[in-house]
Amino acid sequence: MDKKWNLQDIKPAQRPERSVRPAERPSKPAAAAPVQARPAPAKAPVEQTDDGTMRIPIASGSRKRRSNVVLVAIVLLLVFGGIVGASYLLRGADITVYPRHREPNINAEFTAYANPTAPEQLSYEIMTLEAEGERQVRATGQQAVTEQATGVLTIYKSTPGVQRLITNTRFEDALGRIFRLVDSVVVPGAVDGQPGSIQAEAFASEPGEDYNVAAGSRFTIPGLESDADLFNAMYAENEAPFSGGFDGQRFIIDEGELAAAQQGLREELRDALIERLPNEQPANLLTFDAATAFVYESLPAVEYGDNLATIKEKAILQVPFFAAPELAQFLAAAAVPGYEGEPVRIVDHTKLEFAYTSATTSRSNIANEESLQFELKGRPTIVWTYDAGRLATDLLGANRTALNQVLQGYPAIERAQAEIRPFWQRTFPTNIREINITESLEDPDKN
């Protein structure tokens, strides 16, 4: 007989339960921790466009990264384009020239001539400025004064051979006024067609203000009329006016008060003339502050009230001017070894101290002098000159490596450096306005 099985009979065998003390047995069985399954990767959603095609949308993070890359690329392109554009707008060439120059130590006496007779002699021109002023002083009375005008004549002889003129030789101007020589002189004859000349002091034959002849008047010599050739060959001129002629009443003024008033007035006139000098200085000529010479002339006083008189003073400033290139060449020949007469210039002539050899020269009428003796001290910078415009022309369109070859035609330039824009340009500009030349006296090796 078949054995029948109960469901309990086929129940799997179980491990025997471990006895647990009542205190340790939990009130409820602990729930088993759920097993977490790895999520399946999400599939990119597919979107249908208006025209029926399917597209996969790009994630927002990828879109942002791509936008940043494009933005950076655009910025770099704009920057590069700006650099290129600026390079073309600012294109050109900057050339720094280092000319030959020296700083000789000068400490010597020199002579300059109003009318040089040799190429190596230094010449000068005299500029004259005048000013008048007046001031009131107390007068104690009047006195009769008779004075003759005085001045300096330059006597010329246009034929060969010397001619002696004795003391009191008469000279007559166009108005018939007679002046006489103070001392005897010997007038030199003409040389190579140039009239001989000499300066001599003269005085008016009569007193009075009418004999205060203006500068530039011409005089004949009446005593030579018997010899027509000699009379026509000799004449005289006054470079400065005759002055001092007076005939009349002059105020009596206390000597101390008069001297103080004259001194103050002369200082005012001196300052006024010095202030005018820079504005009236001729172009391309230079002078030195210490080269100015002043002479003063007291004019007749006039009545000003019952016990007052007006004194008048005239101040005459005379200053020699030198041609700047000529002075530079003169000093280079005197102080720079190996100098051969090339064109040069002085950078700053105020580095030279000027002083007349004779202290009285600055208080004399230097316009009547044939030469001036003076001393110069200092270390001026003498620079060899060159034609910057011709240099720029020679470089137009040339290869940047041709600079040294071009400089061989400029012995005044020791060295030059060129910077061409844009940096990749291999030739100098073809427009002369795009070539800028600057000069430097610094040592290029120290730059």
Image (cartoon, rainbow, N blue to C red):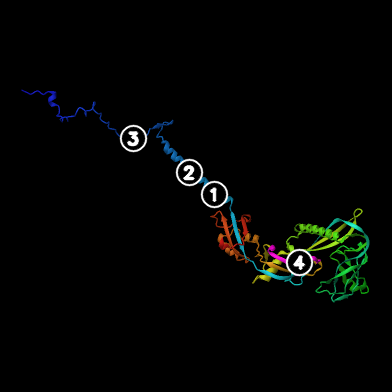
Task: Check disc 1 and give the amino acid type.
Answer: Ile
Mark 1 vs mark 4, CA separation in Å: 57 Å
Q: Which residue is mark 2?
A: 72
Residue sitting at 50 percent across and 43 percent down? 74
Task: Check disc 4 and give the amino acid type.
Answer: Tyr
Give the numbered dot on residue 124.
4
Looking at the image, the residue that sits furthest to the bottom is 161
Residue sitting at 68 percent across and 71 percent down? 334
Mark 4 vs mark 3, CA separation in Å: 105 Å
Mark 2 vs mark 3, CA separation in Å: 33 Å
Q: Which residue is mark 3?
A: 41
Callout 4: SS: loop
**Which percent across, then down, holds residue 366?**
80, 66
Task: Check disc 2 and give the amino acid type.
Answer: Val
**Which percent across, then down, holds residue 29?**
23, 27
Upstream in sequence: badge 4 or badge 3: 3
Q: Which residue is mark 1?
A: 83
Upstream in sequence: badge 2 or badge 1: 2
